[in-house]
Amino acid sequence: VLVSPKVSGMILKLNVVEGQRVAQGDVLAELEDTDYQADFARATATLEAAKQRCQELQGYRPEEIDQAHAELSEAQAQLEQYEDDWRRAATLSDAKALSTEVRDAAQSKLRATEQRVRRLTLAVELMEKGPREERKRAAEADVRASEAELAKAKWRLDNCIIRAPISG
């Protein structure tokens, strides 16, 4: 029976001599496995990282959603203040009691805050919907790819030990 390793490497330990009787499954030789152990450790860590990214995309934390709502509420309160400021500035400007520059500045603040409220409203909606399905599927695919790499690394590491295929 021809016995050869499935992976390449330097023989560290040879447990038999030519002509020696062996039972099926006996360890015949051990190959250097430093690189294969490192590959296995890297694949294990990559899989764990992929699982964590996948878990993170299952949904946002309630605190994150609450934070988005709080930012929106703050912007809405500012918007109310700037609307009042704009009305006063427009009235005073019409009465020639206020310069057009001050009125224009109030109008600019109002427009900017309206856009901020719009942006934060959309952000809250996105937070409530949760992460995109495409990202979830991509993260799940990363987990599957990492699992395959781990299986491959484990196979290589396991094949650093050469066993007798049959008794003889």
Image: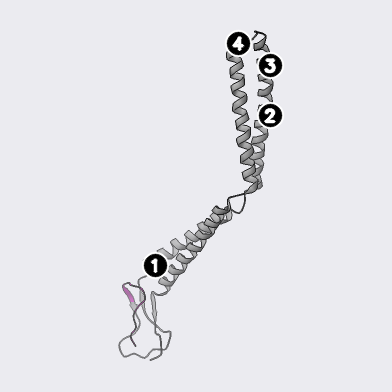
Give residue 127's position: percent from left, percent from top. 62, 45
Give residue 57's position: percent from left, percent from top. 58, 53
Of the two numbered discs 3 and 2 in the rendering, the one whose residue sits closer to the viewer: 3
Q: Which residue is mark 3?
A: 88
Marks 3 and 1, how far apart at CA: 75 Å
Q: Secondary structure at mark 4?
A: loop
The residue lying toward the viewer, choosing from 38 and 142, is 142
Marks 1 and 2, how far apart at CA: 60 Å
Give residue 25's position: percent from left, percent from top. 43, 84
Q: Which residue is mark 4?
A: 99
Of the two numbered discs 1 and 4 in the rendering, the one whose residue sits closer to the viewer: 4
Say what amino acid the circle numbered 3 marks: Arg
Dot placed on the residue nearer the N-terminal end, 3 or 1: 1
Q: Are marks 1 and 4 in contact (CB under 8 Å)?
A: no
Q: Which residue is mark 2?
A: 77
State the quadrant of the N terminus. bottom left
Say what amino acid the circle numbered 2 marks: Ala
The residue lying toward the viewer, choosing from 44 and 84, is 84
Considering only vertical position in the picture, is 63 above or below 4? above
Q: Residue furthest top?
A: 96
Marks 2 and 4, how far apart at CA: 26 Å
